[in-house]
Amino acid sequence: MNVSAIVIHEFGAPAEVVRVERIELPPLTATSARVRMLASPINPADLNVLEGKYPIRPELPGVPGVEGVGVVEEVGTEVRKLRVGDHVLLPHGLGAWREAAVVADADATLMIVPPEVAVEQAAMLRINPATALRMLRDFASLSAGDFVIQNAANSAVGRLVIQIAKANGWRTINLVRRPELIDELRALGGDAVLLDNDEVKDQIAAATGSAPVRLALNAVGGDSALRVANPLASGGTHVTYGAMSRQPLRIPNGLLIFKDLRWRGFWITQWYRKALPSAEAEMFEELLALAKRGLLHSPVERIYPLSEAVAAVQHAAQSQRAGKILFGAPEIVAQFSPRS
């Protein structure tokens, strides 16, 4: 069976290396399923893959796209959990920018998505919501009312940190670079939204009432990373998951010696490599439950058909977008209207 897919044969400028081709699907086996893709986002990591700058390089030629959602069209004779018509999350790193895929060991690798969860939201669950949830759960034992501080709070992950924290009763201090974002992130559920500058120290203390801050999440680096580290309580944890400023961390000796802070890094790909299937299933059960209740939502700016691959990756590379850029099946492209 031949299907359309976005294929790269070399690394380079994203708009120059993506091309739409016909590829042959492998035959269905007793334990596999054929899934027609419905939607898949273009993440910053996907653009890095196209450029050849990501730590993991796919074999070439290859199909990019680390996450997505599809609908089951056919199952093997030994598949028990899945039914034709089920919406499913694709396995991590399958290569989701395609019309369809045959997924091996389908019962173990495909996660069923409840019908109440919008397709475009389900397509984005595997990377950003998972990153936000794991950082909030795995580095500190947070209790109701505890504070978390983060920079880049208007990023895709930052917005999800706000939503997941609010759903669990944790409070957030959110640093942003543009004043027009303050009211928007407060409406999303941020307890305090402050400008990321040298005057923010006293504002953080006022916002927390000098209550201890146990966890800091850093996606920027440089001076901003230090601004979210300084408010941490003794023994607190600073987690770096991005480097938007391209500036290194500068860790003062006093924060190590006198506050005994923990400095950690996080990469969701590494988590998936090590996670037991039961841990992954438990995580998605939590994320899907939040999505069903309308408590987990990422804005989408536009959905493109695969045939417009060049325009899509160019759009995804633009800064200050109102939401994510996705690839979608024709019916998803036709019915989608942007939602904030």
Image: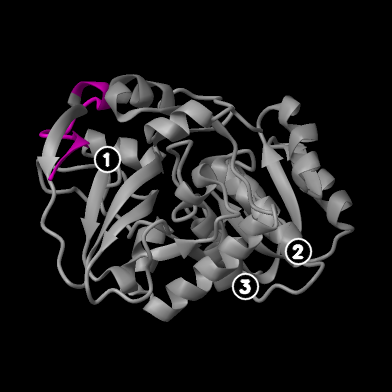
The reply to whether the magenta stretch includes residue 27 is no
Q: Answer above or below: position of 231 versus 331.
A: below
Give the residue at x 22% y 68%: 76
Residue found at x 60% / y 54%: 116
Question: Mark 1 sits on what residue?
Answer: 99
Q: Amino acid at mark 3?
A: Ala
In space, the residues marked 2 and 3 are separated at their CA atoms by: 12 Å
Q: Which residue has dot 2 on it?
A: 170
Mark 3: which secondary structure? Answer: loop
235, 8: nearer the viewer: 8
Residue 140's disc is 3
Mark in the foreground, 2 or 3: 2
Question: Does residue 294 show up?
Answer: yes
The quarter in which the N terminus is drawn is top left
Q: How many marks overall?
A: 3
Residue 139 appears in the figure: no
